Amino acid sequence: MCKMKAFSVVLCVILCIIGSVGFCLATDLETYTNSIGMEFVLVPAGSFQMQTHKINIFGENIIETVTITISEPFFLGKYEVTQEQWVQVMGINEFTGTNPSAFPGRYNPVENVSWFYVQEFIRRLDAMDRNIGYRLPTEMEWELAARGGTSTDYFFGETADHLGDYAWYSGNSEGRTQAVGQKLPNPYGLYDMYGNVREWVSDWYEAYPSNTQLTDYRGPESGFWRVNRGGSWDYDAAYCQSAYRHDLAPGDKMDDLGFRLILYPVITPTYYTNSIGMDFVLIPSGSFLMGSDTNDREKPVHNVTITSPFFLGQYQVTHDQWEVVMGSNPSRLKGGTNPVEQVSWNDVQEFIRCLNAMEGHDRYRLPTEAEWEYAARAGTSTDYFFGDDAGELSDYAWFNYNSEMATHPVGQKLPNTWGLYDVHGNVFEWVQDWYGSYTDSPAIDPKGPETGSGRVLRGGSWFSDAEICRSASRYGVGPDDWGYDFGFRLALSPE
C-alpha cells in the first residue's frame, strides 16, 4: 500500500553535448596532446570488411566475409609510444629498470615490452592524468584505424610497391627501429601503422567468430596468447598488411614489439536527486561484452549495445526511502540508510508504482539485466569493475568475508568509475528481466525472455562469497520470493 504524498517535480536534464566520443573537448577537435606530449588522433566510427578462412569437413578452404563495425569514434595514438615517453612514465624502478629497448633512441618506439609491462605503463599513466584514461585498442579498432577508410591490402593500395614510403620494414629498416613519424601517414593521420614495431592490442588470440556481422567486437574472454598487429622493421612486406595478425604470450618481449594507446575520458558523472533524496547517476550509452554467468563460467560472452543514456540509482534503495513511499519497513535489520531487504520483485513493482504516482510520471523502473551489468562494469571487462583480483573486493563491497552477516549503510565502500556504490555486495539487486539463457549473438537493448518462472537478481550480497559478487554473476528467483539479502536500485528514464 502506498503512503500517499502529493507533489510534483520537474526533472530538467542538461546534458553536456560532447560528441559521440563523450569527451569534454571542443566538438571539432580532431587531435589531442596529453601531459607528457603523447599525440592522439580522432578515428571516426565506421565499418570494414574482413575475410576469414575456415576449413570444412572436406578439407576445403572456405572464405567468409564479416562486416566489422566500430560504433563510436575514439582517440588513438598518432605515433607508437616512444622510449622517451616510456621513461617519463616508468622512471627507474625495480619492475622495469630504465629503458628496456634494444635499439636506444629518444624518439624511437619503445620495444622489448611485454603485454603485462604495457598494462603497468597504462596504470601509471592513468595515475598521472587523473581526468583521462588509457588502454590498448581492440584488434578491430586497430584494423579500422590502420585501414583509414580503405578496403585494400594496404591503406595505399593492393600491392607493396610503395610500402617503403609508409613503413620501416625488412626492405629498408637497416635491421633496427627508427624514429617514429618519418614516413607518410595513413588517411587518418596515423604514422607507422605498418612496420617499425609490431603493436600489442587488448584481445586474446583466437579464430574469428563465424558471425557475418560483429559490432564493437573485443575478442574472446580468455586465451593463451595476445594479439599484436602491424608488422615491424624485421618483417617482410606481406606481413605488414592491414589484416595480418600475430600472436604471442602476454609475457613475451621482443625487439620488434611495442604499442600505441587509446585515450578515453574518465567520465564525470551527471547527478540528479529526486524529491525523497534518492540520488541518480547518468549512465552513458555504449557497448560491452556480457556473459559468463555463475553456473557456467565458460559460457561465451556476447556483445551488447545500450543505445540511450539512462539514470541509475547511485545507491541501493534504503529503509528510509522505502518508508517514505510505502509507510512501512519490511527489513530484518532496521537502519535508516541500510539497503531495504526482504522485498520480492512484485513488492518492488508496487514501490515503483507508488513512487511514479507521487511524482506524477512513469519514468521510474528497474534496470534491465543488460543495463545493470553495463553500469556495474563501468567500461571494464574484468571479473569486477576494479579488476580480476578478488583479494581487493573488501575495498568495494560488503560480502561474507567482511560483512559480519548483516547489511551496512549504503555508500561506505569505494564506488566504480561511474560513481555507483555497492554494485558488488551488500544486497542482491532485482532487475527487470525474466531469467533465461543468453543469446550468443550481438544484441541491442536486450530485455530478456518474454516469460519465465524466475526474475533475475544481480550483484551478490552480504551473505555471498566473492565469486557470486562478480559483475557477470546472476540468479533466477521467483517474483514473489524474498530473502534477507534481496534489495534493489532503480533506473530513471530521462524525459
Image (spheres, rainbow, N blue to C red):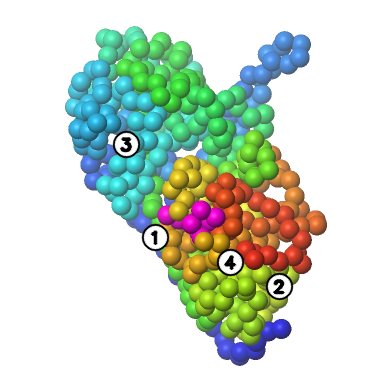
Q: Which mark is residue 268?
A: 1
Q: Which residues are magenta?
A: 395-403
Residue 397 in magenta? yes
Distance from disc 1 to disc 4, alpha carbons, whole Å, reads 21 Å
Gap between marks 2 and 3, in whole Å? 48 Å
Frontmost of labels 1 and 3 is: 3
Is disc 2 placed on a helix, strand or loop?
helix
- 490 on left or right of 450: left
x and y percent of residue 178 in the render?
25, 20
Measured as percent of width and height from the top left, residue 305 is found at 59, 49
Identify the mark at residue 347; answer none if there is no mark.
Answer: 2
In this figure, which residue is indicated by the disc labeled 3? 121
Q: Earlier in the sequence, mark 1 or mark 3?
A: 3
Residue corresponding to mark 4 = 489
Q: Is residue 318 left or right of residue 262?
A: right
Q: Badge 4: how crowded within 10 Å, few (<14), some, or many (20+)?
A: many
User: From the viewer's perspective, is the residue at label 2 or at label 3 nearer?
Assistant: 2
